[in-house]
């Protein structure tokens, strides 16, 4: 990810030449990470998994004729990786933030980050990421922190299109949804993410990291123009809807 300083926007560089033939993931190398780095990167892994798990279906992926995409939309392989990631984050992220020397938690989160990467590399990421790009470029928050703030607000926007998936997310994180209908279980998933965010020290609102009211129209326009991510979202938002989500998160 690079920052385009002229446009004040983060942009991604995507290529198969960037994909390694093999990768060594050693949890011991994360032990010295400060709690904030652990929290921000951990909530980012959760965002990857949730956006991948609730993406538009592969069969409905709206790719115009003649265009190519590195993403495929929701598919069984990505779902499998995303489900494992969400379960691991729900079990281990609080512990890893609380005690950096908790090696079981570090191991669990290293696996979660890896599996989350496999999930979104295939299905794609969506509206949360598109909205974070202008925020991060403007106020210089970490990518994970920006995603963590925005995630529950985007989940609420998307919940009508993905109630069943969100209900299962609540269970994966560790919430008991016994007796809840689909809508209630979906709400439980959003609350679970909000509680996790609070417990690991991620701010609740964009205003806490320096976002101002007057920035929102520009942020919304920039996010709306990230079409490769808009296509992945289960609901294709209008510019006005993106602006509304930003205001709700402010």
Image: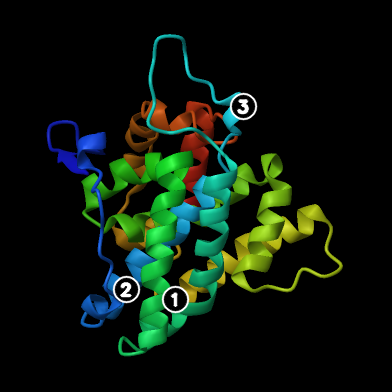
Q: Which residue is drawn at 22% across and 45% down?
A: 137
The residue labelled by disc 1 is 93
Q: Residue 59: which numbered mark, if any?
A: 3
- Rounded to the nearest whole Å, what is the CA distance between mark 3 and mark 2? 36 Å
| Element assignment for label 3 | helix
Residue 120 % position (x, y): 44, 46
| Colour setting | rainbow
User: Between 237 and 162, which is closer to the camera in this rendering?
Assistant: 162
- Is any atom of residue 126 visible in this view? no
Q: Where is residue 84 in the image (x, y as percent from the top left)?
A: 54, 63
Q: Image point 48% across, 32% down: which residue?
A: 72
Q: In this view, does 61 lie above or below 55?
A: above
- Quadrant housing residue 115: bottom left
Q: Residue at x 26, y 73 (%)?
A: 26
Tell us which disc is closer to us: 3 or 2: 3
- Residues under labels 3 and 1: Cα distance? 33 Å
Q: Is residue 171 or residue 117 the one in the foreground?
A: 117
Q: Position of residue 3 (x, y in %)?
A: 17, 41
Residue 42 lies, in percent from the top left, at 39, 67
Mark positioned earlier in the residue sequence (1 or 2): 2
Please indicate whether residue 187 sits to the left or right of residue 149 in the image.
right
Quarter of the image holding residue 40?
bottom left
> Which is nearer the N-term, disc 3 or disc 2?
2
- Give how far apart the Cα atoms at labels 1 and 2 are: 8 Å
Q: Is mark 1 on a helix, strand or loop?
A: helix
Residues packed near mark 3 inside 10 Å, few (<14), some (14 to 19) or many (20 plus) = few
């Amino acid at each position: 990810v690079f920052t385009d300083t002229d446009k004040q926007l983060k942009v991604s560089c995507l290529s198969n030449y960037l994909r390694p033939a093999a990768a060594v993931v050693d949890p011991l190398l994360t032990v010295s990470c400060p709690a904030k780095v652990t929290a921000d990167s951990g909530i980012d892994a959760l965002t990857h998994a949730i956006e991948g798990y609730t993406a538009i279906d592969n069969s409905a992926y709206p790719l115009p004729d003649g265009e190519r995409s590195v993403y495929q939309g929701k598919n069984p392989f990505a779902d499998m990786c995303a489900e494992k990631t969400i379960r691991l984050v729900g079990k281990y992220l609080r512990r890893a933030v609380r005690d950096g020397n908790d090696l079981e938690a570090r191991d669990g989160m290293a696996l979660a980050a890896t599996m989350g990467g496999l999930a979104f590399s295939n299905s794609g990421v969506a509206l949360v990421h598109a909205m974070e790009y202008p925020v991060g470029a403007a106020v210089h928050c970490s990518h994970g922190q920006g995603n963590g703030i925005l995630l529950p607000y985007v989940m609420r926007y998307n919940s009508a299109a993905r109630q069943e998936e969100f209900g299962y997310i609540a269970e994966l994180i560790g919430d008991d949804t016994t007796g809840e209908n689909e809508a209630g279980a979906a709400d439980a998933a959003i609350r679970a993410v909000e509680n996790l965010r609070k417990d690991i020290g991620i701010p609740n609102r964009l205003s806490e990291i320096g976002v101002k009211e007057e920035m929102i129209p520009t942020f919304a326009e920039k996010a709306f123009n990230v079409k490769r991510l808009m296509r992945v979202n289960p609901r294709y938002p209008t510019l006005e809807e993106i602006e509304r989500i930003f205001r709700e998160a402010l």
